[in-house]
Structures are given as structure tokens and as C-alpha cells.
Amino acid sequence: GMTKEPELTKKQLEAKKAQLEKEAVIRANIKEIDSRFQRALDKLQTLIDANATALGFYIKDLTS
């Protein structure tokens, strides 16, 4: 059957809560970074789709 998690002491519960709060902040930061990165990729894809031929002339300048 299912095993029961051991009871945590008050100190352990406080440490667990503090750790979960830290992790929540990290997850929120990563979510924001991912969102910004996705928007940047979407803009880049739009530029590429809009004028792929013209972009080809400048790609060396953009990547150096």
C-alpha cells in the first residue's frame, strides 16, 4: 500500500515552507524569462518570415 510520510517537526516544517517560498520565486523568475524569450523569438520569426531574402544579405552583420 501507500507509505505515510513521516511527521515533520515544527522546525522542519518552517524550513520546508521557506524552501518552497524560495522555489516559488525561482519558478516565477524562470516563467518571466521564458515569456520574454518566447516574445523575442516570435519577433525574430516575424522578421524572418516578412523578408527572408533581404535578411539573407544582412545575416552576416547580425551574427558577428
Image (tube, grey):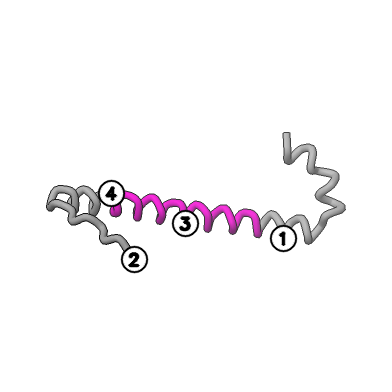
Going 18% across and 53% down the picture, which residue do you hit?
Answer: 8
Is disc 4 surrounded by few (<14), some (14 to 19) or many (20+) residues within 10 Å?
A: few
- Depth check: 61 or 13 in front? 13
Residue indicated by mark 4: 19
Q: Amino acid at mark 4?
A: Gln
The disc, 3 or 2, on the residue closer to the chain's N-terminal end is 2
Asked if the stretch drawn in magenta spans residue 20, the answer is yes
Seen in the picture, residue 5 relative to 19 is either above or below; the reply is below
Q: Amino acid at mark 3?
A: Lys
Seen in the picture, residue 2 relative to 62 is either above or below; the reply is below
The spot of residue 59 in percent (x, y) is 79, 43
Mark nearer the viewer, 4 or 2: 2
Q: Secondary structure at mark 4?
A: helix
Q: Amino acid at mark 2?
A: Gly
Q: Secondary structure at mark 1?
A: helix
Going 33% across and 64% down the picture, which residue do you hit?
Answer: 2
Instruction: Give me the C-alpha separation between circle 4 and circle 1.
Output: 40 Å
Q: Mark 4–mark 1 contact, CB under 8 Å? A: no
Q: How many marks?
A: 4
Residue indicated by mark 1: 46
The disc, 4 or 2, on the residue closer to the chain's N-terminal end is 2
Mark nearer the viewer, 2 or 1: 2
Question: Which region is colored magenta?
Answer: 19-42
Q: Which mark is residue 1?
A: 2
